[in-house]
Amino acid sequence: MNVITADDGERQETANTRRAGRALIIAIHAATRSIKLYPPEHQAVQKSLVELASAALESRSVDADLELRVHGEFIFVNGTRLRLDLSNYASFGRVLELFRASGVGALRVIRDATPREWFSLLTLLTTVGASGAGDADELARRLHAAGVDAFEAAADVDAEADIEEREQAKAAARRTYAQSVALTKDVINSVRMGRVPSARKIKRAVQTIVDEVLTEEVSLIGLTTLREYDEYTYTHSVNVCIFAVALGKRIGMTKLQLYELGVGALMHDIGKSRVPADLLQKATALDDDDWRRITAHPWLGMLTLFQLRGQQELPYRAMVVAHEHHMRGDFSGYPRVIRQRSIAMSSKIVAVADAYDAATSRRSYQTKPYPPSAVLQEMRDNPRRGLDPVVVKAFITLLGIYPSGTLVVLDTFELAVVLAANPNPEMLSRPRVVIVSDGRGNLLQPPRETDLGATGQDGQFTRTIIKTADPDRYGIRVSDYVV
């Protein structure tokens, strides 16, 4: 005889809450889209509102009370965190945006609401969010004025704690970045001086980067915008490591695989420590002998790591990455291959990260870096680059069409710096930005964060990017806003 325990009953109750909660979020998203696309009397709007009222009724039948709460990247229904998967990714993202823009942290349904009342709520949520007020009290006032008493809206009581949490996360990311740059500098200089660097320190640095990417990816990617010219050799290696690990995470690598990928990415250019520094910094065109010495760095890097591995444990994949990261898909890169071979996935990932960071950085022979969005477009559209198209597509999904640190001009003529890609894959062209100047070019103090996915009462986007801009032209240092 099967005995149902109290724990079994609790698990079943939680599962029921999650099931009803997911249905409710999907219904809210569907109704919001219908309201945006059609007039209120349209059959599609009415149908979606009836389904939403029914989904809310189902949630209330499970728990009697109904409270939706957003915190960070999570949505809770009656204190139970809903699980995100591919089938509800877009719905969750839209509801999170809706709540954040309107300044609502919690929404309580205190009685069964009619379809008309749900229509009023969703319309007012969108309106308050689009106004830039972001005020839950304002939403409550408008609901009262409209005679809608089925809902209670409250601000996120943890908002200040969230801000402090984010600042602490940014500080931790900055420490990780600075320590990684210092470690890379020490390793390269040690090899250049004929000393043996510590593999233990390399592994510790990569483990820290992997941990940061797994917990605070956005902050660490934002730091790649620093790209200091004087420290290019070292910051480049760290940037490539961050991009590669974040991309590996995006395509589903395990933590061990991310670690091995990270070591290869951080050490991909270690062979340059055996190339004369004045040649690496040469601003004029390279002759044939210069080019021959430069193109030797992949196999020199492999040998360097092999010698390190002879004394201290390092993953073999790191050596493969050092050797292959300049090989193209058609093997027209370097070093030249004698017979056909398959290039490792880790090498393809590092090749994409390396190409992106190199093109968007200022170097001795490239005093004006290319705009990030233009680099991504070139990587995607020019097959002669020899980059794996699937990896490039995943990289664009990671960074968005406008990567972190891109200066953009909005259709309001405001200037904004991109902070992070929109988590909704349908809105890669609508990132989260910080507006740094008004439409007349006056710098804002303080700057104002906004989500370009936000829509107004008419269902239209409140702001849209019309083009990218050169930060130097406006005297703007984008890293001041991103990190």
Image (spheres, rainbow, N blue to C red):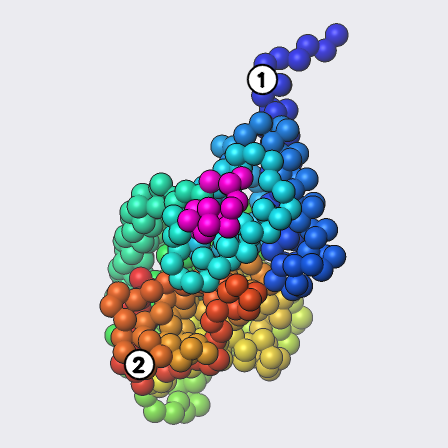
Instruction: Where is residue 376? Give x, y as percent.
Output: 52, 75
Tell me if residue 216 comes above or below residue 430 in the rendering. above
CB under 8 Å between discs 2 and 1: no
Indicate which disc, 2 or 1, sits on the residue closer to the N terminus.
Answer: 1
75 sits left or right of 270 in the view: right
Quarter of the figure with the C terminus = bottom left
The numbered disc on residue 7 is 1
Residue 340 is a magenta residue = no
Q: Quadrant of residue 281?
A: bottom left
**How far apart are labels 2 and 1 at the CA level?**
61 Å
Picture quadrant where residue 413 is located: bottom left
Name the image quarter holding residue 25.
top right
Query: Residue at the spot x=70%, y=53% of the render?
Result: 46
Q: Which residue is found at the position 63% from the left and 24% from the top?
A: 12
* Relative vertical location of residue 469 with respect to residue 51 in this rendering, above or below: below
Figure quadrant of the N terminus: top right
Taking depth in this image into account, of 429 and 159 the one nearest to the observer is 159
Label 2 secondary element: loop
182 or 167: which is nearer to us? 167
Q: Residues within 10 Å of mark 1 (few under 14, many from 20)?
A: few
Q: Amino acid at mark 2?
A: Gly
Residue at the image position 46 percent from the left and 50 percent from the top: 145
Q: Is residue 336 above or below residue 223?
A: below
Q: Which residue is mark 2?
A: 441
Q: Which mark is residue 332?
A: none
Q: Which residues are magenta?
A: 139-152
How many marks can you see? 2
Q: Tell me which residue sits at (65%, 53%) in the image.
A: 30
Q: Secondary structure at mark 1?
A: helix
